[in-house]
Image (cartoon, grey):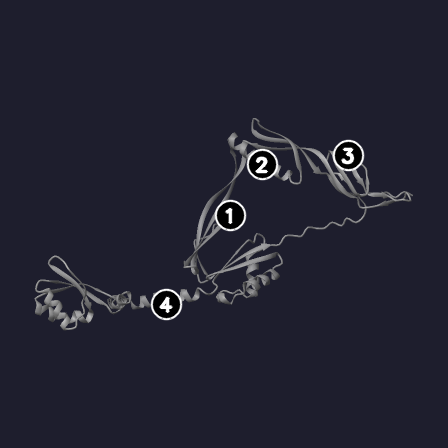
């Protein structure tokens, strides 16, 4: 049934209205003259029906012989639509050509977006990707993203990895910058294990060297816990690199104070600029301000289904930075002070076992202070080179 309706729409048909006369005779005459009729419906004093374009041209004889007056209600179908568009053929062809161009060229690279580069300039990364084979206008199915990523990282030493994703005509490159490897100190020679802070020594296990402090005794910062020498069986002394495990019971105070008048940074929007993006070409609209502190970009591209088309707009918003002292309420100062205090405590408590704590909050005349005293077990051993003085 759908196929029949589709064919009738392609070839076109007429909807007409018949009044007066003998409608049954009219239908019989149409059957005799092989004029197709369908969707015949009777109403109060008239009837409606549909016929082909050729059938409506020959229907006048049947109407005259049956006394029925025929009036066309509307013409439906593709031929009538094309007839209306005939004066605008150029526009229709242009639109069709534009749609075809968009569909075909959407499979090529027109836009390259880079993210994750805080210190490496975009121009350096773009030059490396272009040398590796990523060019504007290249077919996306010809890209080997794995090899492209490896070649880009090899060309730019500051990058440790580049994740490349292709979506329609867009190529998104998310880079990970390499970090400096930690320097390994050369610790050849004799070393002592000393206390890094004032504490009560709880555990002392010398692995190499000679024990110099007693467990459960109080030690000061810099006191030698394990000496960097060993007494041999022949009572001679050898210098060694002392090693061991030393745990002390320490007491640490952490405080955080926030003034009721605090410096605040406010970012004020200055202006917006727009850039039309069409097949890799940027058409700027608006002028960038001469003075600004921050800028934020946001791109909106046309999407067809799951494909990103090479047409869109980029909005860039510019902000200026304003710093001034502002008064804050005691409640806000208390929250800020507590937040700073918890941040300091989280850094302090790493690698330590807290055995007791005493936390207090106090409001001064112009500030709010959070203070805590913590007793904990922690590793207090630190390696210090053994200084040897030669005597004549």
**Secondary structure category for the residue under label 3:** loop
Mark 3 or mark 2: name the one nearer the start of the chain.
3
Instruction: Locate residue 363, reporting x and y percent.
Output: 56, 27
Residue at 60% x, 54% y is 177
Mark 2 or mark 4: name the one nearer the start of the chain.
4
The answer to which image quadrant residue 385 occupies is: top right
Which residue position is annotated with label 1? 294
Give the number of marks. 4
Most extreme residue toward the top, as rendered?
365
**Disc sitting over residue 316 in the figure:** none
Label 4 to label 3: alpha-carbon separation: 89 Å
Mark 4 or mark 3: name the one nearer the start of the chain.
4
Residue at 75% x, 37% y is 203
Label 2 to label 4: alpha-carbon separation: 62 Å
Circle 3 residues within 10 Å: few <14, some 14–19, many ≥20: some
Q: Nearer the viewer, residue 288 or 193?
A: 193
**Secondary structure category for the residue under label 2:** helix
Which residue position is annotated with label 4? 97
């Amino acid at each position: 049934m759908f196929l029949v309706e589709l064919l009738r729409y392609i070839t076109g048909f007429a909807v007409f209205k018949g009044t007066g006369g003998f409608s049954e005779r009219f239908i019989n005459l149409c059957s005799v003259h092989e004029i197709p009729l369908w969707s015949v419906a009777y109403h109060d004093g008239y009837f409606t029906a549909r016929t082909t374009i050729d059938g409506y041209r020959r229907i006048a004889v049947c109407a005259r012989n049956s006394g029925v007056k025929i009036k066309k209600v509307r013409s439906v179908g593709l031929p009538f639509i094309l007839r209306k568009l005939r004066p605008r053929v150029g526009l229709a062809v242009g639109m069709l050509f534009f749609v075809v161009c968009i569909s075909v060229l959407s499979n090529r690279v027109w836009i390259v977006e880079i993210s994750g580069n805080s210190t490496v300039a975009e121009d350096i990364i773009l030059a490396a990707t272009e040398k590796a084979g990523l060019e504007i206008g290249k077919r996306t199915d010809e890209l080997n993203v794995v090899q492209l990523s490896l070649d880009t990282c090899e060309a730019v030493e500051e990058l440790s990895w580049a994740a490349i994703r292709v979506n329609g005509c867009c190529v998104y490159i998310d880079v990970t910058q390499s970090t400096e490897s930690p320097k390994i100190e050369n610790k050849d020679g004799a070393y002592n294990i000393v206390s890094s802070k004032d504490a009560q020594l709880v555990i002392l296990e010398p692995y190499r060297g000679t024990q110099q402090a007693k467990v459960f005794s109080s030690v000061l910062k810099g006191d030698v816990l394990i000496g960097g020498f060993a007494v041999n069986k022949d009572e001679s002394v050898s210098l060694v690199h002392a090693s061991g495990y030393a745990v002390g019971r320490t007491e640490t105070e952490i405080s955080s104070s926030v003034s009721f008048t605090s410096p605040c940074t406010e970012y004020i929007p200055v202006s917006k600029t727009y850039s039309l993006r069409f097949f890799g070409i940027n058409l700027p609209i608006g002028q960038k301000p001469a003075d600004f502190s921050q800028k934020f970009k946001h791109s909106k591209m046309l999407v067809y289904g799951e494909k990103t088309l090479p047409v869109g707009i980029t909005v860039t918003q510019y902000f200026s930075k304003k710093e001034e002292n502002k008064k804050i309420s005691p409640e806000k100062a208390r929250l800020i002070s507590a937040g700073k205090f918890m941040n300091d405590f989280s850094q302090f408590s790493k690698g330590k076992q807290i055995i007791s704590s005493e936390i207090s909050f106090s409001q001064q005349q112009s500030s709010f202070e959070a203070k805590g005293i913590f007793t904990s077990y922690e590793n207090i051993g630190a390696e210090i080179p053994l200084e040897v003085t030669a005597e004549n």
